Image: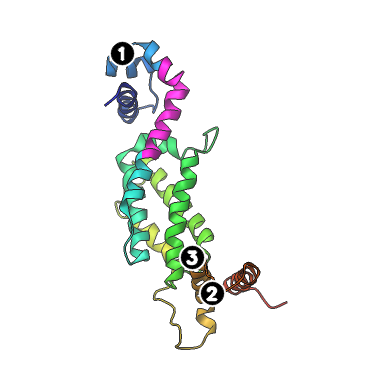
Amino acid sequence: MDTRTQMLEAAERLLDESPDRDIATRAVCEAVGVGAPVLYRLFGDKNGLLSALVDYGFERYLGAKRSAGHTEDPVADLRRGWDAHNGFALAHPAVYRLMFSPHLAQVPGASKEAFSLLERTLVRCAAAGRLRVGPHRAAQAIMSANVGVALSMVSQPDVYTDPGLSHRVRDAVFAGLLTEDPVPGDAGPAEPGAGAAALRLAALLSDGSDALTGAESALLREWLDRIAAGAPRA
């Protein structure tokens, strides 16, 4: 492990142990056995160290997300993704608070990749006929709820003591966004499943199709978006 990584690991450990959620750069240097000039050379100052710690947290978080892959069941993958997110927060409470802090001067680009990975799973859910709203809207609801629960649990562990809280919130959020069963293609009246069916077709179209021109695809997506949103006819 190089000196830079050792200092990031030490900073995280000291933050986890700190009662006031703060650290001194001198303590980080002492933990690794280096002088202050090394920290200044690698990180610039304390803010640079904390910024690098945020990047290091996202590096590990996204690494686990990328390596998880996916199965044939996108809804099961969605549940595992929620649980993995919460598990990372509980395993790295101090770093997680920094990663999703509303006080960051600039939102890390890695957070956008995390959102994109979630949205891809939701596109697969839509293609399977399991989504009630568009993938982007669903991703906003899920990510905000997941982060909210995780931040509450790591920021106020003495208040949020229920070990089943994350699963309860997950199931409540998913119940409003997911259908119980895949939308049938040729059974029952069309209207009850029209929105989910439109989302399913839109997701399938996103893989690309040579059967339609660009203009035709754009028009079809507009119609599908209106059906999914329940928009009245003009």
Point out which mark residue 10 bears.
none
Q: Residue 148 magenta-drawn? A: no
Q: What residue is rendered at 51% in x and 88% in y?
A: 189
Q: Mark 3: few, some, or many residues within 10 Å (few <14, many ≥20)? A: few
Tell me the CA gap for discs 3 and 1: 52 Å
- Label 3, secondary structure: give it: loop
Q: Position of residue 138 (x, y in %)?
A: 49, 60
Between the residue at mark 1 and the residue at mark 2, the CA separation in whole angstroms equals: 60 Å
Q: Amino acid at mark 2?
A: Ala
- Whether residue 167 can be seen here: yes
Question: Is 54 part of what is drawn in magenta?
Answer: yes
Residue 98 picture quarter: top left
Query: Could you tell me which residue is drawn at 32 percent across and 67 percent down?
Result: 72
Classify 26 as above or below 18.
Answer: above
**Which residue position holds label 3?**
207
- The residue drawn where x is 33% and y is 50% is 84
Q: Amino acid at mark 3?
A: Asp
Answer yes or no: do the residues labelled 1 and 2 have beta carbons within 8 Å? no
Image location of residue 76, percent across then percent down = 33, 63
Instruction: Name the mark on residue 34.
Output: 1
Residue bearing mark 2: 198
Q: Secondary structure at mark 2?
A: helix
